[in-house]
Image (cartoon, coloured by chain):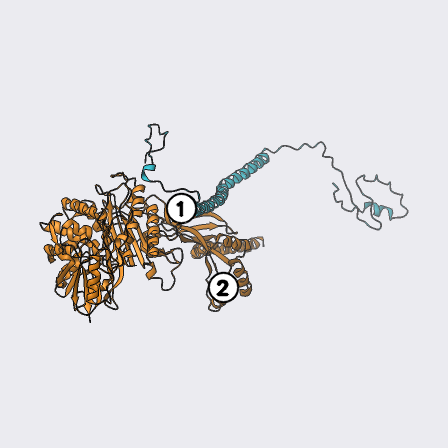
Chain colours: A cyan, B orange
Amino acid sequence: MATPAFSRKMEASAVAQPGRPAPVRAERDPYQLRSLPHEDVFFYSKKIDNSRLVREADPRSRSACWSAIGGAGLVLVLLTGVLAPSVANTLEGYKLESLRVEQRRLLSERQVLQLQEAEMLRPDRLETLAKRQDLVTPTTEQVVHLDGKSDGTVAMVK
Amino acid sequence: MIERRLTILAAILVLWGGAIFAKLLSLQVLHHREYVQLARNREELDVAISAPRGTIADRHGQPLAMSVPTESVYVNPLKVPDLQVASTILSLVLHMDRNDLYGKMKWANDTERGFLWVKRKITFDEGQSIRNLHLDWIQIQSESQRHYPNGALAAAVLGSVDFEERGNAGIERSYDSELRGKPGRVRLLTDVNRRGIDSQMETPPRAGTPLTLTIDERLQFVAEREIATAVAAHAAMSGSVVVMNPQNGEILALASYPPYDPNDPPQAGEKSARQNHGVSVPFEPGSVFKVITLSAALETTSLRPDSPIDCHGGVLRLPGRIIHDSHTGMGVVPMATVLAKSSNIGAIEVGMRVGQPRMYDYVRKFGFGQKTGLELPAESGGKLRKLGQWGTTSLASVSMGQEVSVTTVQLARAASVIANGGLLVKPHLILKKGSQTVPLPAPVRIVKPDTAITMRQMMEGVVLPGGTGYPKARLEGYSVGGKTGSAQIYDVASRHYTHTYNGSFMGFAPLTNPAIVVVVTLNGTHGTAGFGGQAAAPVFHAVATEALRVMDVPRDLPDQTPPPQLAKKAEVDDLSIADIGSDQPNILEEGDDESETAAAGPRVPNFRGMTMRAVLATAAAQGLTVVPGGSGVARMQSPPPGSLLHEGERIRVQFVR
């Protein structure tokens, strides 16, 4: 990294006096940058070789980093643990309510079907159908009740 | 300097923190309830859960009345964007009159009503069409609608409900509070789209209690069919049939004509047409009441079925009245014959032996003059004058079933006393409430078992050859006991008895161990064909046959073919009977004159308008005996022209100048 150099006026004052023997030019500073014209500000830069510099491991920052990661993870788990049941509850709540609506709909449908069944079993309708099929009401002696067997394989006795 | 800056920064932070804290305090402490309520209003819905009305079923579980869910449409007129467009849309979908609907919505909007029913109890298709519109200003509410799947069957028992499903007649009215149930409320938590997330039951709904009746749907159908046929055949005004189990009072069928369909709302002036004629309309029973008279005689006097009773040749003079029997030749006959032939004079003689106080006592014991306690509204208790209000001839009238009004159910209960061995049971219609069987009061003994058995044997005579119920009341394979009745209907406006009848038959079968009692009444029949034995007995035959078959009652007789039906007697001339030998108005009595005898005698000629000489000559030529009265030209005669003359019977002819 270049370090700012402060101006030196030594060389400028040596060249300005006549009759004196010319001073021996000093070796140019290898870090000095070319100066700007008519400027008496000189800049110096210097490269610093850090290639042999070995970064020393900081155990405290490592542990701090892992601690931060662990803490964040823990916080995440805790938050998930707190929020997840609520989310699951809400989702299950949707399902439950839709099932309840479905249950009410099915119960209503069942009542409607029961009504239709009762209308189809109306005595006057059955009589009309029986007449169409040439069926007549049996007399008492035409009705035979079978005795049921112990294993129930025959029609039940009334 | 730095310290000053730090102080200023710290002050700012403190102020900022304080402001935050103050706001938190305001939100969570000071206005906590207000914000909770706001949140609830936004997220929660109060939903009413309707309680279905209880089902009414017959004794076998067949539903007779049930409620099914339906929907109704309503709007908030203040939130409807355009009333014209809204009324157009709704009228198209719901098949309503557009102008009428617009008028209602405009009125509601102008009067700032936030609620308006558009149409109630819509069909399923209409509901679907409304939903498919997806318009948030149309709301649908669930309701319930009552249905009677069998139409008019048992309508007089079931009754009906109004638009709010409140019972207004019959069992629906009597048990309205139990059938109705109680709606519940649920608090529903919803999301932003109003989908339900969770629900909390605040008030659970209580469904209406289902009722099981004692009615048998099949017997009810047969009873209604037969009474309708008989009313039409005899041009009667109304009719009723009661079928009852005499052992426990269960009513297996209660038919009333004319019928009505409870699915249809009542029309103006239809109130009388929806009466239950078997329960609410009393009538003078006539000769069926002789069963009570003879039962009282067996209990309180030394009379027995073979005790001789003088029928005075068919004419009996009482203070201010002359009573006639159609059988003018009946002299002294056994008491059993009084019942079989239905002799009015014989019944009066028996009643006189009983006496007023004991007759009154037994009529009350048999349940007349008071309600039976049947679970129907508007039950009539009939009418029986208090003993202190009886006139000089009231005993005679009551003995033959006049000066007393009864209902068909009361007659059924009275017949049950004879059928079950002397116990007065309570007629009832409710078998179960929910799953609980309704407890019954213990029956009360009112006559001795011997009396009941003796009465049964005498009542069998009514349906045997020579009896007034023969042959139409006979049942194939079963012994039957019964009594016919043909009471003239009294016209209150003109204050005299008309020539229309209440034809009745009251009977039970089988005789040895009666399983059913059937009482049939036809109101407003005409002529001899309208008498009990002709009009009501066939209905008894059909209903009792079906009931015994359905109940699987074993037969106690071999099958018998009924004898060929003999020619009926011509219509009795009431006026002639009433006016003979009296200057005062008579209470015209009609015995049951439809007995069919094996031997057919000569027919009575028409003597009206003939001189006495011509009458005597005509009678002599035919070998008939004529008893003339008065002088001049023949105006009235008894028996009437065309009727069959019994052996030894004489013809009375009244001559007037």
Q: Picture coordinates of residue A92 (x, y %)?
A: 48, 42
Q: Is residue B163 above or below residue A118?
A: below
Where, by quadrant of the figure, is residue B591 drawn? bottom left
Q: Which residue is mark 2?
A: B77
**In this orientation, which residue lies closer to the viewer: B143 or A6?**
B143
Q: Picture coordinates of residue B192 (x, y %)?
A: 52, 52
**Nearest to viewer (mark 1 / mark 2):** 1
On screen, residue B27 versus residue B593, left or right, reads right
Q: Chain of mark 1?
A: A
Where, by quadrant of the figure, is residue B358 drawn? bottom left
* Residue type pointed to by label 1: Glu
Q: For the residue labelled by badge 2, is the local secondary structure a helix, a strand or a loop?
A: helix
**In this orientation, which residue lies closer to the viewer: B604 or B398?**
B604
Q: Is residue B252 above or below residue A66?
A: below
Q: Which residue is mark 1?
A: A127
**In this orientation, which residue lies closer to the viewer: B333 or B636?**
B636
Q: Picture coordinates of residue B187 (x, y %)?
A: 43, 51
On screen, residue B145 versus residue B14, left or right, reads left
